[in-house]
Image (cartoon, rainbow, N blue to C red):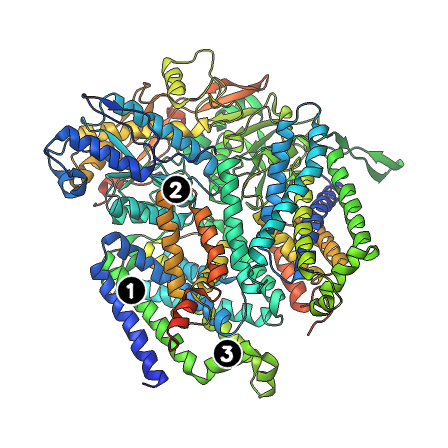
Amino acid sequence: MNQAARSVVLHGLVIALLVAMFFVLPEYHSGNLARILVLAVFAMGYNVLFGYTGLLSLGHALFFASGMYGLGLSIQFLSASPMLAIVIGLITAVVVSGVIGFLALRTTGVAFMIVTLMFAQAGFLTVLFFGKYTRGDEGFVIQRAQRILFGVDLSQPLPRYFAALILFAICLCLIAWMVHSRFGKTLVAIRENEERARMLGYDIQRHKLMAVIISGTMSGAAGAAYALLFGYAGASFAAVQYSILPLLYVLLGGAGTTIGPLIGTVFMFYLIDISSEYTDAYLLIAGLALILLTLFAPHGIAGILRKKLAWLP
Amino acid sequence: MTDTKKSSIITSSSGGKIGGQTINKSMNRRTALKTLSAGVGAMAGVGALPGMMGCAHASDEPIRIGFQVHRTGIGAAYGRWYDRTTEAVVKRINDEGGINGRPIEIVAEDDGTDPKRGAEVVEKLATKHKCDVAFGTLFSHVVYGSAPRAGELAIPYFVVSEGHHVASGALNRYTLQPGITDVKSQVEAMGPFIKENLGKKVTMIFPDFAFGHDHRDYFSAAFESLGGEILEKIAIPPTETSFSKYFPKIPRETEVVYHVMVGPAVLTFVKELGEFFGPSRPEIFGFIDSLEAVDLSSPGLEFLEGTYFWEGNPRYAQEDQTEFDKAYREAVGVDESGASISDAKDVSTYAHMFGCWETMYVIKAGMEAAGYNGPDDRQKLIEAVESMTEMPHSMEHPQGAKLFNGKTHQVFGHQYISKVTDGKLVLAHTTSIEDTLYEDEVDYTSMSF
Amino acid sequence: MDFGPHLFVASLEGAITAAVLALTAVGLSIVFGIMRVVNVAHGEFFMLGAVIAWWITSLIAGHPALGFTVALIAAPIIVGALAVICNRFVLHKINYEPERTIVATIGLLYVIQQTTLMTFGPEARPVEAPFNKRIALPWFEFGESGFALTWPWGLSTTTYKLAVIAAAVVILLVLWTVMTRTKIGLIMRATQLDQEMAQAYGIAVNKVYALVFGLGAALAALGAVLVVPIQQAHYLMGDDPLLLSFIVVIIGGLGSVPGTVLAAVLIGMSDGIISVFFTPTLAKILATLLVAFVLIFKPDGLFGKRRE
């Protein structure tokens, strides 16, 4: 099998497995998995910029929140239909990531980290500043009746799960395709050696900006999906922890791999969920696990898999 | 190690009681089941058959109350006392024979004071732990994040949050707040006292998020309708750790400073307020939220002498202390100064935590009125609580008499205003329940389940 | 309050913020500058300093100055030692690889925070200042009767706050002297410039790293002990200093200690002064954006040298 065919088979299998999961898993875990798929989309978006382009952003909560509030506020104040609200959420994310990308890409390395962090902080404070509309930290509920997409009630387990899975599958396919495209290969070339890529005649800035926009929009899609599927939008999702989370997911799962973000998200979610049943000190366990992982699995969990199965994309 | 207690189950039946044990959570469920199956004899393995809970003959099966608690994150100081109060009330109810003869079992899960995790915890309590109801949330952003899931999963969700979310109509039929009054009624009831006793020109200082905005909006409207004047509204960003630079915005002609702050920086806030005014302070009226779980004798708080506080429930035992307050303090393990019996420096969140006690008794009363047998009766439970009205001052309601509004799912009650006298909070005024009422904003009973 | 005194109060508050920020950030600056790693747990070393200060002062009876002095010496040493241990058993093992260091130090952050929550508890706990007297400040006015001194309502500060500014200046000067005038400083700077070359000249780079990491943490703890009588010890108090010092270090220019100090002054003062002109949250938004735009136009920081 050539590389492309292998990629199709592998990713098809992942999606098929996820379809089957809904029917196999008990209610609690399939509910969790719906959430994990949405968060994994966030992590995949992050991975486009960090894993493939080599740009470490500390401001992705802003993109997540753009999608979330773009959708949430348009439902709340414009009585938009869910479909229209999704479009508005995505447009918000595209615009925000375009502007931030344009400004922040004047910097690189640590300065890029700080600039994105600062914009995200300013975004978080802006949500609070317009508390009259956003209800600040408290946030607002998107009622069940406002979450009916094409007659399907997204607050129900089955539609919710498959809505999350469809979004996830689209993003996964997009990234799997991107990896093999000229565009994706250029991004990797930039990551590996920016100077060399420049000398080969690539327009570095344009590629990086595209990467920021794709990454930001995917993160925004996750934010919009979260609000729509779980019925809540609040400022805590714009706070700095939600910029660090996708970084953590990606590093744990394996940066620059297509399924690493999903693995990292599953791992982190269940690490907290399971350990919290045995002790209140679950963060202690999570912390130790992170330290041990860096000591013994330098390239994330997908890194371990890849060592065993060299053909993984 | 101060607080690594696992949720403790305290079961009791006519035969014998297992009280006050603090054991590992995964262990205690097993132990409890063992005890129960021994008691029921042939009915071995009841715990493995949650489907049987709906059956009439499963009457010794514990009622599982899911406790969404802030053990970590910004709400941890409150969570610890919500934990202790809940433990105390469950022990008391179980000692008295439980609910409909069935003991209560608390299944506690930490939500990290985070709305996302909060929603996950409600899911977990409902679908994994198969709890009968969920209970106990304080921070209002966690309530907002979790309530939609509670509604979708059709699990009654009893919050103890003092937010206006429930009564505002933003939530759903499954979410109720029967054990603690909401911020709107608290704030509006303060107007008359401030105007008559402290002054007509008020400057408000509050955190720049929803809780602070509720204070700003409801108090200023109520106060202006009484003929008072709000000179300035100073919103402090929630990430702030130093406050002196904002105080010059307080107008010179201010007669009363109204403050309410939450979070770990509250002590700094109050201290710096004192340093700013020095010897020539105006009257000061604060919400005790600014100093919950904080010792009034902390360095820098001397200037609070002679200032006033709203208190949900008077922290210091008053001269005319009721027998209910006395017994309640004893059960929770709080001394006359509102601190832990075992550590005088460990100050409780006395103004709020009574809500856990009273809510648990409302759940009990509701379940008994509804003839609650299991999750199939959840709607009956909601309807039973909705039909409640007057709750007399009693051991079930040690904070004071209450009036429940079934349409808005919100309880109303007396509010207390105390004056700092010799470093203690001494009750100066008690509002009537009528002072705290406002027009209904929602009728949940007209919504379908 | 009139505009003049208001601006004065805000500047004074800004100066205190700057002083504490400089102390916290300078620790991160040398770690970042010399070892080239982002230590996400830096804020937790700050928090530990404050918590240990509370612990020590609550053990020692008598005049508050006594316990405070002990804390001022002991807390940085304890925290520094702890940091050296973390360095030895974690960072050293992963070879200071940038990405793994981020994950590992996030792990450390969780561990330290949770351990503190379980031992110290969730409350904010105060530490009494060794001395703390409110001083009303005078203001001048040029009125009808000529030049006059007045004592405007509310215009004040405390002796302790002024002492914090002075202490920060002294500590930073000492650090500066050590870095530029001593052999150990020379070794540290040599390692910063070229790690491999330093090794070739027989410098034990591993020992230098351990020293630098410990020193960085100790400085953060020292800043925390100084600030804890103004704020309180709380297990989540490390989050903000982490972000702020991180920002200060980058704005100042990577590895430039004077740059870090100047950036701390800039950020602290602008935070104070901007608050005079806008509503508080808007002021915070503007101060945050200011940082972003400084970097957009000066990507290497205000005092950084261009590095390829």
Residue named by callout 1: A163
Which mark is first along the chain, 1 or 2? 1
Residue A196 visible here: yes
**Label number found at residue A188:** 3
Mark 1 surroundings: few (<14), some (14-19) or many (≥20) residues within 10 A: many
Indicate the secondary structure of the residue bearing disc 3: helix
- Tell me the residue at 21%/45% (across/down): B449
Chain ID of residue with mark 1: A
Measure how far apart labels 1 and 3 are at the Cα level: 31 Å
Q: Please identify, in this view, whether the residue under mark 2 or under mark 1 is nearer the observer.
A: 2
Residue named by callout 2: A279
Which mark is first along the chain, 3 or 1? 1
- Tell me the residue at 31%/85% (across/down): A1
Give yes or no for contact between labels 1 and 3 (Cβ–Cβ under 8 Å): no
Q: Is residue A12 left or right of residue C146?
A: left
Indicate the secondary structure of the residue bearing disc 2: loop
Residue type at mark 1 is Ala
Q: How far across and down, in percent of the image, does residue C83 sit?
A: 62, 49
**Label number found at residue C264:** none
Q: Is residue A221 left or right of residue A59?
A: left
Residue at the extreme top? B320
Mark 3 surroundings: few (<14), some (14-19) or many (≥20) residues within 10 A: some
Which of the 4 quarters of the picture holds residue A55?
A: bottom right
Give yes or no for contact between labels 3 and 2 (Cβ–Cβ under 8 Å): no
Residue type at mark 3 is Val
Chain ID of residue with mark 3: A
Q: Please identify, in this view, whether the residue under mark 1 or under mark 3 is nearer the observer.
A: 3
